[in-house]
Image (tube, coloured by chain):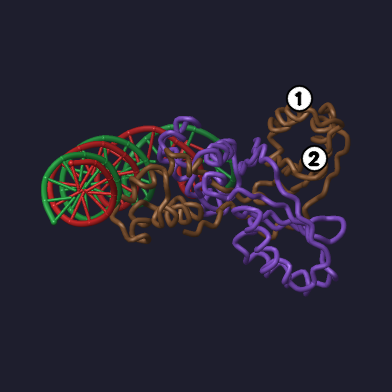
Chain colours: A brown, B purple, C red, D green
Amino acid sequence: MIDKLDKLDTRILNILQKDSSLSTKDIAQQIGLSVSPTHERIKRLKTEGYIEKYVALVNRERLGKHLLVLCTVTLKEQSIETLKNFEESVICFKEVLEVLCIAGGQDYLLKIVVDDVDDYHTFVVTHLSSLSNISTLSSSFVLKEIKRETAYYLNY
Amino acid sequence: MIDKLDKLDTRILNILQKDSSLSTKDIAQQIGLSVSPTHERIKRLKTEGYIEKYVALVNRERLGKHLLVLCTVTLKEQSIETLKNFEESVICFKEVLEVLCIAGGQDYLLKIVVDDVDDYHTFVVTHLSSLSNISTLSSSFVLKEIKRETAYYLNY
DNA sequence: TCCTGAACAGTATTTTTTACTGAATATCAT
DNA sequence: ATGATATTCAGTAAAAAATACTGTTCAGGA
């Protein structure tokens, strides 16, 4: 099979996105194949880039990361160079988990995770606001994470 | 050890958040322990809730999910009942990966993943806008996903 | 100092992963 | 239609990993 997904591949991806600790045997049973072809498919899905990586998802609160902040940033100018410079700088901060470039006014949305409000203040002052070409910077604290899902729903 | 993390636990979590396909042996070598205690620690981190689950992260674009949308929702009223009702409804939509309750005006930010603009239009019309008590609904298309990280940086 | 419990390394067993083989099935050109 | 070719499958075997178990060392408290 050359780089195209059939129903079984899709089912495998739906399963692994939910729980990658399942054995090949378990998955094989769920999709109705034997172990060998199931294993081959899973391996192929990885090598062909459908699966980027396997990770452990941890409990944020349990680990003392109590504050989740959404931060909207607008830049003074929108030259390629300025955008590129900002992007390259901001992705380096370990506190910044996501950086999205948003349509409309050319701006960015940052998802930032820190221990607490003090920690956030320190981060903004010592790191974020020191970046060049920032015009405005607006922070919104997240009161509650109602849903957090990493699995895309794939239908065949 | 009763429910507290030491330096080794933290290192294990940092490793597994980046790549959970590593063998216990590999991790043991990285943290400077033998396989047995390393395995015990990993198992404990799971049972004690530090690790929520193991998942495969897939390539969104590769799988035809070309559109990522941030949608801000404000409700007509902020009674407990109304909020609860909205939250319970919206988490059921498979297209909605994240739901965050934001400080300030009582509103929500939704991260929505769909195939394309048509798909999004259909979703809004047939699902999202049909929810009761919605006051305003503002959609922003994501032009580019600059950074997407699921690992929290843990320092000891 | 002796006792107790926690954490470790090492070993053994079970399970899983991975590679390999041949059969069945589908594909395609003749 | 038929034969050649490639793909996908199941089954088996070997390698590797996960898991359970055992005894030892080390630290803290009576």
Closer to the camera in the image, B29 or B101: B101
Dot 2 falls on a residue whose secondary structure is: strand
Residue plotted at (70% across, 28% down): A88
Q: Horizontally, is A80 left or right of A4 in the view?
A: right
Amino acid type of the residue tagged 2 in the rendering? Asp
Q: Where, by quadrant of the figure, is residue A143 drawn?
A: bottom right
Residue A118: % across, % down: 82, 41
Residue plotted at (61% across, 44% down): B150
Q: Which residue is labeled 2 in the image?
A: A107
Q: Chain letter for mark 1, please.
A: A
Amino acid type of the residue tagged 1 in the rendering? Glu
Closer to the camera in the image, C27 or A129: C27
Q: Which residue is labeled 1 in the image?
A: A81
Asked if A126 appears above or below B133 in the picture, the reply is above
Residue A117: % across, % down: 82, 44
Asked if C24 appears above or below D17 in the picture, the reply is below
Q: Quadrant of the C terminus of chain B?
A: top right
Residue A83: % across, % down: 76, 30
Residue plotted at (46% across, 52% down): A13
